[in-house]
Image (spheres, rainbow, N blue to C red):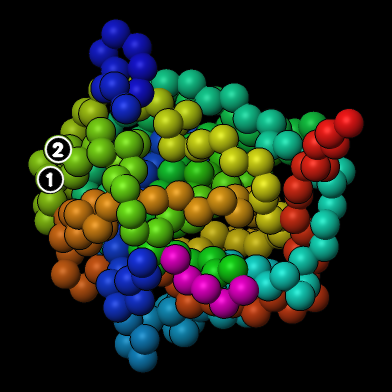
Amino acid sequence: MMGPTARHAGGHLAAAAVVLVLIISAAAPGAMAQEETEDEHEFSYVPGDEHGPAHWGSIKPEWSACGTGKMQSPIDLSHERVSLVRSLGYLNHSYRPAPASIVNRGHDIMVKFSGDAGSLVINGTAYYLKQMHWHSPTEHTIDGRRYDMELHLVHESAEKKAAVIAILYEVGDHDPFLHELEDDIKRIADRRDDKEESVGVVDPRRARGRASVYYRYMGSLTTPPCTEGVIWTVVKRVRTVSKYQLELLREAVHDDMEKNARPLQKVNDRDVSIFRPKPHRHY
């Protein structure tokens, strides 16, 4: 985290689940990147519950895609169906620090930017960073393996199309980016007033990392209304997060929202690609 007012950033938990949603946004109301429902009582992540994932599509007419969509997320990224496509190229992104606020929405923790946090360019189209959010355990799996936490960096184009970068984490060393937000998360833990609190300047470059190998496919938002047409980029390199940080995030949200990862969806006939740079030749 940078700028004169910025902060300076320096296993497998199958039974434990947390979601932290960091939303970095200056988006207009109604934009795809802001479409996630904010009423925590309207849906749940509890299997078998009448408001659980299997029933999201029937709770509201505008959520029908959650049940009938053919391009839903998350999915398993199985190497049996992944094709190498080097023409995808390196991720072309340019992020920058911006002022932000944090709020406890009950089912997640949200951080919003009040300024321009930068963009990602895909096929010549700029997708501006609007939000970032964490789920634990991960929503996507790789060859059937589910990791401990997943970060989503959600972007939106001028035409209101969405593109998401997902980064996977396993328990190990603490995550420096999350570390700078720990005091703020404690400050709003279990609050129900949706009051925003300033967190100064946040630098999304600290969260993105430098990994270059990634998966690419077309999918959807992973929370209601499950809108499709989202370009997904899942970074292959797994990063680390501390057990303490996972516990902190789980305790911050409301008790019935501690398990916040949507179940895997059917791949159907979608193409799943992977970008990997050509190996360097030594002469």
Res 183 label: 2
- Image height check: is 177 above or below 56? above
> Which residue occupies 73% across, 37% down?
90
Residue interval drawn in magenta: 143-147
Q: Residue at x 50, y 44 (%)?
A: 153
Residue kind at label 1, given as amino acid type: Lys
Q: Residue at position x 43%, y 55% from top?
A: 169
Task: Give 39 or 201, whichever is nearer the viewer.
Answer: 201
Circle number at residue 186:
1
Residue 100: percent from left, percent from top: 32, 28
Task: Verify CB contact (< 8 Å) between mark 2 and mark 1.
Answer: yes
Q: Main secondary structure of the magenta part?
A: loop
Give residue 65's position: percent from left, percent from top. 59, 72
Most extreme residue toward the bottom is 48
Dot 2 falls on a residue whose secondary structure is helix
- Three-letter amino acid code at disc 2? Asp
- In this rendering, the answer to whether 102 lies above or below 233 is above
For disc 2, the neighbor class at 10 Å (few under 14, some 14 to 19, many from 20) is few
Q: Nearer the viewer, residue 78 or 156?
A: 78
The reply to whether residue 106 is in sight is no
Q: For marks 2 and 1, give the CA distance.
A: 5 Å
Q: Quadrant of the N terminus?
A: top left
Label 1: few (<14), some (14–19) or many (≥20) C-alpha neighbours in 10 Å: few
Front residue of 242/251: it is 242
- Identified at 51% across, 36% down, the residue is 209
Q: Is residue 22 visible?
A: yes
* Residue 129 drawn at (x, y percent): 53, 34
Say whether residue 128 is left or right of residue 60: right
Residue 127 quadrant: top right
Instruction: Name the secondary structure under disc 1.
Output: helix
Q: Please give the count of numbered marks on the rendered protein.
A: 2
Q: Is residue 119 magenta?
A: no
